[in-house]
Image: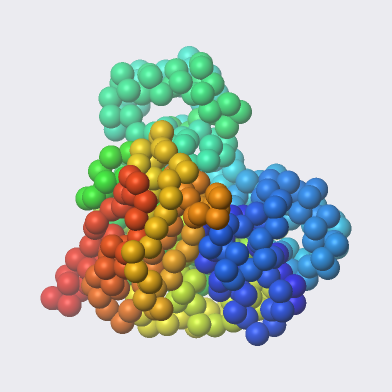
Amino acid sequence: MRILVVGGGGREHALAWKLSKAKRVRKTYVAPGNPGIAEVATCVDILASDIPGLLRFAGEKKIDFTVVGPELPLAMGIVDEFEDAGLKIFGPNKNASRIEADKSFAREFMGKFGIPAPRFQIYETASEALKYTKTVNKFPVIVKASGLAGGKGVFAANNKRAYEKIIDEILVQHRLGEAGNRIVVEEFLTGQEASVFVLTDGVSITYLPSAQDHKKLYDRNRGPNTGGMGAYAPYPTNKRISNIIENVIIQPTVLSMRDQGLDYKGVLYAGLILTSTGPKVLEFNCRFGDPEAQVILPLVEGDLLSAMVAAAEGKLSDEPLKAKNQWSLCVVLASAGYPTDYRIGEEISFKQKLDSRTLLFHAGTRMEDSKLVTASGRVMNVVRVHDNLKVAKQKAYEEIKKISFKGMYYRKDIGNTGMKKMKRKRRK
Ligand code: GLY
């Protein structure tokens, strides 16, 4: 098979690394890719959002199967266009991608089908949104832009003044453009967060390992939200919680999408919060998580590519994909100033060769005058797999000491929650 992976971040590096190892794969292309991806695949200079360019390339190179990494091309309708052209592609079509791309649609859908979720209101104008302070008036509260905002569309308002400021920025000043034409105001929930991933063809569901992301910039989950500063997998839940996730969240969501005439094929990512009253959906995403893909894909032992092809063809089985009985941990190395004003173009150097058991997935890197330099906020992902989570963490952090670039920042506590959970489990 000739495969094409669309995207150029850490998630796509992990996908290209994993899929290129499949026996059936003769050639892997990634568009646009990055210098790390270039070590496992052929990178082609086409942006993930350039659907006509990708279509042309897939036609010319006789691509057998395309896998889409990021949400933007999915929301733009890449799957519809590839399928219309008779090309096989993995991911939901434009309508089904609304589960991520249109957060008010997603919340109304969850409400209609009784999927556990926070209470919410939807507003389109500032005057409507300000009524919240006269009616519900509960703080903290979460304000989300309904459209895709590249990870910059979720805000927590701790009080009325902060809420009014956010409303002004989104609905009056239109700082998020069209993505903020409508907002969802949601109940603030507390609990551990977990990322659950399934492959589906719209009927059958195949579970992948779950993970826990670390969205806040600083240790102990403080500071601003980021795209994710690290992750570990699997996320340790108990049987009771897993049953609720499967039977009350995932299965009803997949079947209700179908009920609504939405043909959901691809990966469904449920971002959950495990509250004292049970798991609730913070968000659904129509793609793999980043950095979650970097930890779940190294654990998958089953034939991921065949399962993805089966999902795209509507022939998936309900069997979970075989996974290693191990832990995987990823630490994200970020540029100084991420997630707001960060510097790029810093040279990345390696003081020592990395251990052959370390997986280094590039995110924002590029070659400049034959030197590897930083090119974005999240730069690299250092991943280790081990039988013991504590050792996976220790090894990943040892490896980080070999990498440097000016202003390199990373969290020091990735995996701590998982270790605490495991300790409590052992004591019981
Ligand atoms: N890790 C969060 C995301 O992929 O949306």
Left or right of 77 in this view: 247 = left
Residue 54, position in %: x, y?
76, 54
Left or right of 49 in this view: 275 = left
What residue do we see at 83% from left, 68% from top? 62
Left or right of 94 in this view: 189 = left
Residue 137, position in %: x, y?
32, 25
* Front-lying residue, 214 or 374: 374
In the rendered view, tell whether residue 198 sits above or below residue 371: below
Residue 286, position in %: x, y?
58, 54
Q: How is the image coloured?
A: rainbow
In the rendered picture of this protein, how many numbered marks are placed on residues?
A: 0
Q: Quadrant of the N terminus?
A: bottom right
In the rendered view, tell whether residue 369 sits above or below residue 119: below
Residue 278, position in %: x, y?
33, 57
Q: Is residue 224 at least partly visible in the picture?
A: yes
* Front-lying residue, 369 or 259: 369
What residue do we see at 51% from left, 23% from top? 175
What residue do we see at 38% from left, 83% from top? 325
The image quarter in which residue 356 lies:
bottom left
Q: Is residue 215 at least partly visible in the picture?
A: no
* Front-lying residue, 239 or 335: 335
What residue do we see at 35% from left, 46% from top? 406
Q: Quadrant of the C terminus?
A: bottom left
